[in-house]
Image (cartoon, rainbow, N blue to C red):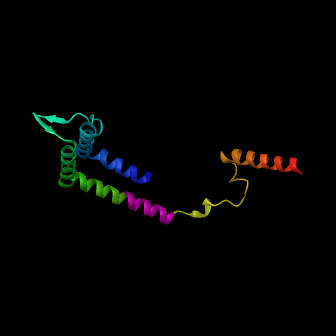
């Protein structure tokens, strides 16, 4: 997932027009739909738009901008390159070092304190009953 995000970030940074276009779309969505109070309708040049009309216009503009400009092809190609890198990484990954043979190594984390105190408390309560 991190490799995919890095490839997308590098791809967008190397194509500033696409980055500016996506940031403009993001700001339009945030300004016109997310952060606008729902009790006040959107008024543009004397025309009042309902929430449904605003949502429809934003979806239409997003689809047009993503698919009719180079932004869509850039995102798809960067995603495919990122997925290819992830697949190559997964194919060459050696899973031998993922499993541990010793038992005490796995219980040395944060939950060992919680689990250890619960086991000790259970052991003490059992000893007091005998």
In the image, residue 99 sits, relative to residue 50, either above or below, namely below
**Residue 109 visible in the snapshot:** no
Quarter-of-image position of residue 99: bottom right
Q: Looking at the image, which residue sits at the far bottom?
A: 91
Residue 96 at x, y percent in the picture:
61, 63
Q: Is residue 3 magenta?
A: no
Q: Is residue 91 magenta?
A: yes
Residue at x 39% of width, y 60% of height: 83
Residue at x 40% of width, y 54% of height: 4
Residue at x 31% of width, y 44% of height: 13
What is the chief secondary structure element of the magenta stretch? helix
Quarter of the figure with the N terminus: bottom left
Q: In the picture provided, is 48 more to the left or to the right than 101?
A: left
Q: Looking at the image, which residue sits at the far left?
A: 46
Residue 103 at x, y percent in the picture:
73, 57
Q: In the picture provided, is 65 more to the left or to the right than 121?
A: left
The residues colored magenta run: 82-92
């Amino acid at each position: 997932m991190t490799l995919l995000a890095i490839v997308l970030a590098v791809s967008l940074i190397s194509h500033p027009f696409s980055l500016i276009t996506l940031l403009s779309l993001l700001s339009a969505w945030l300004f016109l739909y997310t952060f606008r109070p729902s009790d006040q309708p959107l008024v543009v040049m004397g025309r009042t738009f309902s929430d449904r009309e605003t949502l429809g216009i934003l979806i239409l503009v997003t689809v047009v901008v993503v698919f009719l400009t180079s932004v869509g092809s850039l995102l798809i190609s960067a995603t495919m390159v990122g997925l290819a890198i992830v697949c190559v990484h997964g194919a060459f990954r050696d899973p031998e070092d993922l499993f541990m043979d010793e038992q005490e190594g796995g219980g040395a984390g944060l939950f060992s304190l919680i689990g250890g105190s619960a086991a000790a408390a259970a052991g003490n309560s059992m000893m007091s009953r005998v």
